[in-house]
Image (cartoon, rainbow, N blue to C red):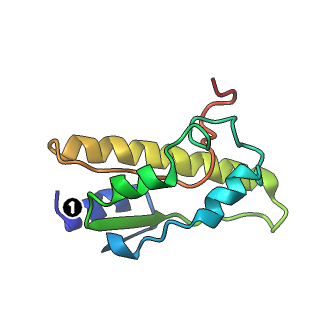
Amino acid sequence: MNEETLCTLARDFFDQAKDMDAAAVPIDVAVRDMCAQNACGHYGKSWTCPPAIDSLENLRGKLAAFTRFMIVYKVYALEDSFDWEGMVESAKNFQARISRFKKKVAAAANGNPFLVLGAGACKLCAPCS
């Protein structure tokens, strides 16, 4: 799948999609350290969070197989900076978009490898197994 097709698919779900060189993607141990300190309260409580997910070394190995990377985002309106409910709903909506985007990419990839990564703990299901 070429970058233009992927960007077109991404724009069906997100406000913006930017293609970039994979070498420009930082993998920062400080972020994983915040996970280990349970900074967000999800450590060990979600299959998308440490310690359930790959180590940084394994992630680096997976990313090394790719030469291109795409970052996507969507802007959500909040009532104010204390709109916790709006933030939670926005995160759920974004994660649902990521999930639907991944399915569209899989259908269009014709067996070509791809990897979809998101940020934060998954919030699609209320209790996590």
Q: Nearer the viewer, residue 89 or 24?
A: 24
Horizontal and vertical percent for residue 129?
63, 23
Horizontal and vertical percent for residue 117?
45, 52
Circle 1 residues within 10 Å: few <14, some 14–19, many ≥20: few
Horizontal and vertical percent for residue 112?
18, 47
Q: Amino acid at mark 1?
A: Thr
Residue at 14% across, 43% down: 110
Residue at 76% across, 53% down: 37
Residue named by callout 1: 5
Q: Secondary structure at mark 1?
A: helix
Q: Note whether 73 is above or below 84 in the view shown.
A: below
Drawn side of residue 27 relative to residue 21, left or right: right
Q: Nearer the viewer, residue 14 or 49?
A: 49
Drawn side of residue 29 relative to residue 12, left or right: right
Residue at 53% across, 41% down: 53
Location of residue 107 (image quadrant) = top left
Q: Nearer the viewer, residue 39 or 19?
A: 39
Drawn side of residue 21 relative to residue 27, left or right: left
**Farthest-out residue, right:** 82
| Circle count | 1
Drawn side of residue 42 relative to residue 124, left or right: right
